[in-house]
Image (cartoon, helix red, strand yellow):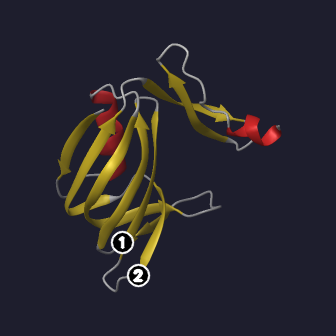
Amino acid sequence: MKAFPIRLKPDTDLRKTLKNFAVEQNIQAGFILTAIGSLKQATIRFADQSNSTVLTEKFEILSLNGTLATTGVHLHMAIADRHGKVIGGHLSDGCIVYTTAEIVIGIIEDFNLLRTFDQQTGFNELEVVSLEVGFLGLNICNKIQAS
């Protein structure tokens, strides 16, 4: 595994920058190891909603999780407002860094993470492709449940 530590400066769009970084670095199987920082605007899609909500106040980034690759990113974030109220959801474009965002991205070299359309969910979902010959056990949860 490799790791890329990066710092995003004020007024940077968090999701767009991570998406562009994955493309520029040709990341095929990346994930967020750790992330902290602050936002002056958060754009989050909450569970079972089709549109994102824009929140314009100062927030601390408590957690950022998910996968990233040249084929797309899927990230979720938890943030706290000035009163300590925590909210979270699907990270959308429009999350603007306030002071800093310190992020470490992990890279797994033996896999490709693809985003392929899933008819069951209606979304582009994760498809894990092993580059190691003979490796089994990926994308099998549905097969196990069906047995």
Q: Is residue 139 visible?
A: yes
> Considering the numbered disc 2 on the image, is that residue within a helix, a strand or a loop?
loop
Identify whether 109 is placed above or below 90.
Answer: above
What residue do we see at 41% from left, 23% from top? 110
Classify mark 1: helix, strand or loop.
Answer: loop
Image height of 19 relative to 14, above or below? above
Q: Residue at x 18, y 58 (%)?
A: 10
Location of residue 29 with respect to 51 vertically, above or below? above
Residue drawn at x 30%, y 32% is: 1
- In the image: residue 109, left or right of residue 116: left
User: Label 2 amino acid?
Assistant: Lys
**Image depth: mark 1 or mark 2 in front:** 2
The label shown at residue 143 is none
Q: Residues within 10 Å of mark 2 (few under 14, many from 20)?
A: few
- Res 11 seen here: no
Q: Amino acid at mark 1?
A: Thr
Q: Which residue is mark 2?
A: 85
Q: Which residue is mark 1?
A: 56
**Residue 139 left/right relative to 69:** right
In depth, the one of 110 and 6 nearer the eye is 110
Residue 65 lies, in percent from the top left, at 41, 53
Camera-side residue of 86 and 40: 86
Label count reads 2
Q: Position of residue 61 (x, y in %)?
A: 32, 65
Q: Is residue 130 above or below residue 10?
A: above
Which quadrant of the rendered structure holds the C terminus? top right
Asked if the residue at tag 2 contacts the one at tag 1, i.e. Cβ–Cβ closer than 8 Å, the answer is no
Viewer-nearest residue: 23 or 84: 84
